[in-house]
Image: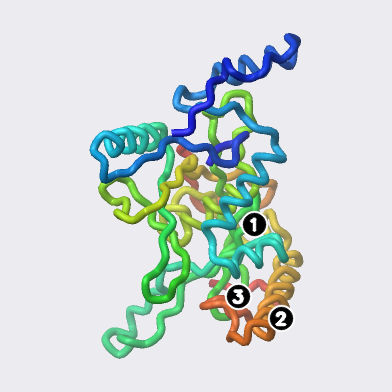
Amino acid sequence: MLVRDPDSLPRRPRGPSARRRRRSRAALPGWIRETPVGSAEAERRSLELLRSVVNPDEWEMFQDLGFICVTGRRARRRPSEGARGAGAPVLPRYRYLVYPHLPVVALLPRSMAPVREYCVQFPDHSAGGQSPMLPRGDDVLAKWMTLRADEDRLLAYANVCNAGCQIPLGQIERDLERLGRWEARRARRTGSGGLAGAATAPLRGGGRLPT
Amino acid sequence: MMPGYGETLIAEGDPAVEQERELLVQAFRRQLDEGMWAAVPVSDAASGRREALLVTDFSEVPRDAERVLFWPRAAGGDRVGGAAPHRGSPTA
């Protein structure tokens, strides 16, 4: 257990900001042994945690593009296939663009056409006087872990809108083009065939394909 | 993971040591009681890809897990204009 006695910290001058800090600390849950850090340090820690958990290519993607393309694990339902489809590669129902502090964008797996926005946040109201929003890296990591481990759980909690509701379709299209170029560059550099299950294709119909 | 920290250590110990395990179990339950979600970073044995395993009980944590991450459970996010949501369950 990391234990840091708050009384051992240097005394700060008393004033309005000191009172705010005391109020903030008093409101924190008892198990927290550390005083809050500045937003820049929280951001740095969150990005370091993200780097340590996601795959190296996903971290690289996040650094270069500002989002991560995640493949969902729910299989598309194909009731007509029956036993004939057994053993055939199963497409995920959706792929997702995971942005920090923006909705998760669901894409059709083959065409990469955006079809839904899943608006989801992870507010923490136990953090005393802090903003209830997680730092950027934590927000992305929370989405990544939930999507990879239990996609349905995340989607069940989200507000669902059509694609383009908050993130303009033009931006999504540009990001997918950037992703395609990024994957091609990376594949050339590493000699691989691109990211596992994250192949991209140009948008059709201006990115407004029906589901 | 929490606002204002990025990450903060809640507890650490060796689950093979009974006393330490009890502390870890208590810390785990406290987090879930406070409405947190928990996951263990894992690697897929076949592909080597990093994955996450959501856990709702300490017994589900793999024996070789190095850490368990907690974060506030999801809530429906704010929409900025646009159509009404198809569904929503902001429960946090």
Do discs 2 and 3 share a chain?
yes
Q: Residue at x 67, y 56 (%)?
A: A165
Q: Which residue is mark 2?
A: A185
Distance between the alpha carbons at the discs numbered 2 and 1: 21 Å
**Residue B68 coordinates in the image, percent (x, y):** 41, 47
Q: Nearer the viewer, residue B67 or A39?
A: B67
Query: Label 1, on which residue?
Result: A99
Q: Marks 2 and 3: which is nearer the front?
A: 2
Residue A41 is situated, as x and y percent measured from the top left of the image, at 68, 40
Q: Nearer the viewer, residue A37 or A151?
A: A37
Amino acid carrying mark 1 in the image: Tyr
Q: Quadrant of residue A208?
A: bottom right
Q: Is residue A87 left or right of residue A62?
A: left
**Other residues around mark 3 within 10 Å, as few (<14) / some (14–19) / many (≥20):** many
Q: Is residue B69 above or below residue A114?
A: above
Q: Residue at x 73, y 60 (%)?
A: A168
Establish if A133 lies above or below A170: above
Q: Earlier in the sequence, mark 2 or mark 1?
A: 1
Q: Amino acid at mark 2?
A: Arg
Q: Is residue B1 visible?
A: yes
Callout 2: helix, strand or loop? helix
Which of the two discs, 2 and 3, labels the residue nearer the N terminus?
3
In this rendered view, identify the residue nearer to me: B91 or B19.
Answer: B19
Q: Do marks 1 and 3 both belong to one polypeptide chain? A: yes
Give the numbered dot on residue A112. Answer: 3
Categorize mark 1 by other alpha carbons within 10 Å: few (<14), some (14-19), many (20+). Answer: many
Q: Residue at the location (60% across, 75% down)?
A: A112
